[in-house]
């Protein structure tokens, strides 16, 4: 493996892609359809089960925080320190690292299959990237620990107890190293279609936090949560080391192999991905900054509301977590039609999951918060404040889920590595017949986003497109800041939540356009029509759930009544409106519950 020089930034985004497959190759893939569907179903089942366990433990963690410490200046200080792992997790585990390394390992696996006579490209990739990553992570962790006072002052200048926040920040700074290791190893395992261990990392993480909270909260106070975060991050990385080493040994090839640089590392491809993740996480920075000038406990109310609300988004993101390696490998093989079809399905399925969750939270927020949190130091005033924030915050969940779905294939088009035998260099290195501006029709009858214009895939244009998601997120941040500054003086924390929802919705709309520019020619009428049907069903379901949930003053009964009503109304209306994402699972459930009679499957021969 070699490393590309800075001047090679102008290489086209599809430099890592071979020529697109012709229409004649499609039938060959047909026999694999049922097998692939089975693999996806099993992977989603395992991932969903372990992710649900991790989310349940995370919810228990938040319940203990509320019970032991309530919502006060101490919890506000800890939550400012928790900004470090909250930022490191999307940057190093969930988003940036996965966007970079899943496509990179996917391309290495494609080369392993194509060139069995050469040295293993997967092992080459690990040797070229892992040592530098470890060095960068150690440096970053030390910088965060040393700069903790300045970081706290920047994030929350009006904080009531900055000294406690600095102490907790220095403890949580350690998480940068194990988070980065976990993200790297998890990306490699997902590219190999190994989903069990990566899905278990948050189980280990939250078990570490809970262990320290339960045993040390009386002695360390809220600092016990920070120590638990550090311990949990170590367990998270430890879960992945053995499975990763086993996968790496499986690729070892006996006997001498012909060398050659099968992959070329593109270091500067890291910058747009990391910048997008940090810009997206800046929404949390804005919340903490604006909330620090509001009454003590406001940051905690925002945090509790966000943590519960995001459970619905997490369930939606599970879908594209499982399917992302398929999209990355399709792009690595040049199959833009398969990538487009998969992204369209992911958008619909993620929207269906997150919208039914949003309708439930809007309908039942007071009962949910009371049932979960109202005990110990968490009082009725905290319940009312958190529930109000949750209802407003939930309005942005669909856009958050769709943003997560769309940005994965966007960055997969230009992975952190490319094939060594692909052309490179400035405008002259444009890939002919491929790429978003080459006039290639990537879909069956649908035009490429250039609408037939034969525009060259110039390096400058491609470099600008790399930064499109960052620009889209920056526009969203401006909306967040504008709405927050305009409304917070009048409605407090509700204004912060409204700014968050408005900003991420603007970003999602811009990213939808960005996928077209990138060469993934989504069929917009189909996508937007499906989203509109689901949104209409969710709006009516939320109204019905609110009315039914109000029939009971008992939180548990209200949650059950409202939740059942939301699900039933959403299912009925989604089916009636023709939403395939709702109708398909319902029909499958009906067939499973009421299978056809044996006579319908064929008649027995005569004499039997």
Image (spheres, grey):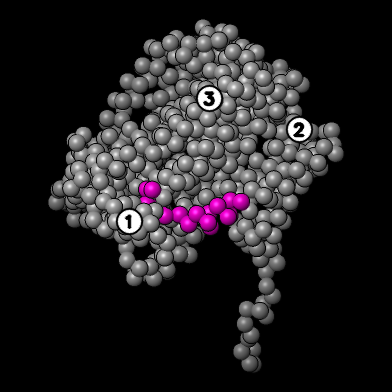
Q: Residue at x 71, y 55 (%)?
A: 573
Can you say which quadrant of the picture contains the C terminus?
A: bottom right
Q: Position of residue 81 (x, y in %)?
A: 50, 17
Q: Position of residue 215 (x, y in %)?
A: 59, 19
Secondary element type, mark 2: helix
For residue 205, side relative to residue 91 (left or right): right
Instruction: Give whichever of discs 3 and 1 has the lower sequence position.
Output: 1
Secondary element type, mark 3: helix
Q: Nearer the viewer, residue 84 or 467?
A: 467
Give the number of callouts. 3
Q: Which residue, given by chain and number where applicable, does mark 1 sit on?
A: 453
Secondary structure character of the magenta stretch overall: helix
Q: Would you say residue 176 is visible in this rendering? A: yes
- 3D distance between C-alphas at marks 3 and 1: 38 Å
Q: Which residue, given by chain and number where applicable, does mark 2 sit on?
A: 367
The tag on residue 481 is 3
Q: Are marks 1 and 2 in contact (CB under 8 Å)?
A: no
Q: Residue at x 59, y 13 (%)?
A: 293
Q: Position of residue 120 (x, y in %)?
A: 23, 48
Within 10 angstroms of label 3, few (less than 14), some, or many (20 or more) residues?
many
Q: Residue at x 31, y 52 (%)?
A: 437
């Amino acid at each position: 493996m070699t490393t590309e020089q800075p001047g090679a930034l102008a290489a086209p985004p599809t430099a890592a892609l071979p020529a697109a497959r012709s229409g004649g190759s499609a039938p060959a893939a047909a026999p694999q359809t049922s097998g692939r569907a089975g693999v996806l179903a099993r992977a989603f089942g395992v991932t969903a089960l372990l992710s649900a366990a991790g989310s349940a433990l995370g919810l228990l963690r938040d319940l203990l925080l509320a019970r032991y410490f309530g919502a006060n200046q101490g919890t506000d200080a800890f939550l400012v320190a928790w900004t470090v792992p909250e930022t490191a997790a999307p940057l190093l585990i969930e988003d940036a690292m996965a966007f970079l390394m899943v496509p990179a390992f996917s391309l290495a696996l494609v080369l392993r299959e194509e060139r069995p006579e050469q040295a293993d490209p997967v092992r080459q990739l690990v040797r070229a990237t892992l040592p530098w990553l470890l060095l960068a992570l150690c440096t970053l962790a030390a910088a965060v620990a040393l700069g903790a006072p300045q970081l706290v002052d920047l994030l929350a200048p009006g904080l009531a107890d900055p000294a406690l926040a600095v102490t907790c920040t220095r403890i949580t700074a350690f998480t940068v190293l194990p988070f980065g290791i976990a993200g790297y190893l998890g990306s490699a395992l997902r590219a190999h279609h190994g989903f069990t261990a990566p899905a278990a990392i948050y189980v280990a993480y939250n078990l570490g936090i809970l262990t320290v909270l339960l045993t040390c909260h009386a002695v360390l106070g809220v600092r016990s949560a920070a120590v638990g975060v550090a311990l949990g991050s170590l367990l998270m990385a430890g879960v992945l080391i053995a499975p990763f080493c086993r996968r790496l040994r499986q690729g070892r090839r006996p006997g001498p192999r012909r060398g050659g640089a099968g992959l070329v590392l593109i270091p500067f491809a890291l910058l747009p991905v990391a910048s997008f993740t940090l810009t997206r996480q800046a929404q949390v920075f804005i919340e903490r900054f604006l909330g620090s000038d509001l009454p003590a406990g406001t940051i905690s109310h925002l945090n509790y509301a966000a943590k519960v609300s995001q459970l619905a988004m997490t369930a939606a993101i599970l879908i594209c977590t499982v399917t992302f390696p398929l999209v990355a490998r399709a792009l690595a093989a040049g199959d833009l039609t398969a990538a487009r079809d998969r992204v369209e399905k992911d958008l619909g399925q993620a929207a269906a999951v997150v919208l039914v969750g949003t309708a439930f939270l809007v309908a039942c927020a007071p009962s949910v918060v009371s049932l979960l949190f109202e005990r110990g130091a968490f009082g009725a005033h905290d319940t009312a404040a958190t529930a109000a924030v949750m209802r407003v915050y939930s309005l942005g969940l669909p856009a958050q889920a769709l943003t997560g779905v769309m940005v994965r294939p966007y960055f997969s088009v230009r992975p952190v590595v490319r094939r060594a035998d692909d052309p490179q260099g400035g405008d002259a290195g444009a890939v002919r017949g491929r790429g978003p501006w080459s006039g290639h029709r990537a879909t069956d009858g649908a035009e490429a986003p250039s609408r037939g214009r034969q525009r060259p895939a110039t390096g400058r244009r491609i470099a600008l497109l790399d930064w499109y998601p960052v620009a889209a997120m920056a526009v969203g941040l401006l909306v967040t800041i504008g709405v927050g500054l305009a409304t917070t003086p009048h409605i407090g924390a509700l204004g912060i939540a409204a700014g968050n929802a408005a900003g991420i919705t603007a970003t999602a709309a811009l990213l939808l356009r960005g996928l077209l520019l990138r060469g993934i020619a989504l069929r917009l009428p189909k996508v937007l029509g499906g989203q509109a049907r689901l949104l209409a069903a969710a709006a009516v379901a939320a109204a019905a759930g609110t009315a039914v949930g109000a029939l009971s003053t008992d939180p548990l009964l209200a949650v059950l009544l409202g939740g059942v009503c939301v699900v039933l109304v959403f299912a009925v209306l989604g089916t009636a409106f023709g939403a395939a994402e709702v109708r398909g699972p319902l029909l499958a459930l009906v067939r499973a519950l009421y299978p056809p009679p044996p006579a319908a499957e064929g008649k027995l021969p005569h004499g039997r």
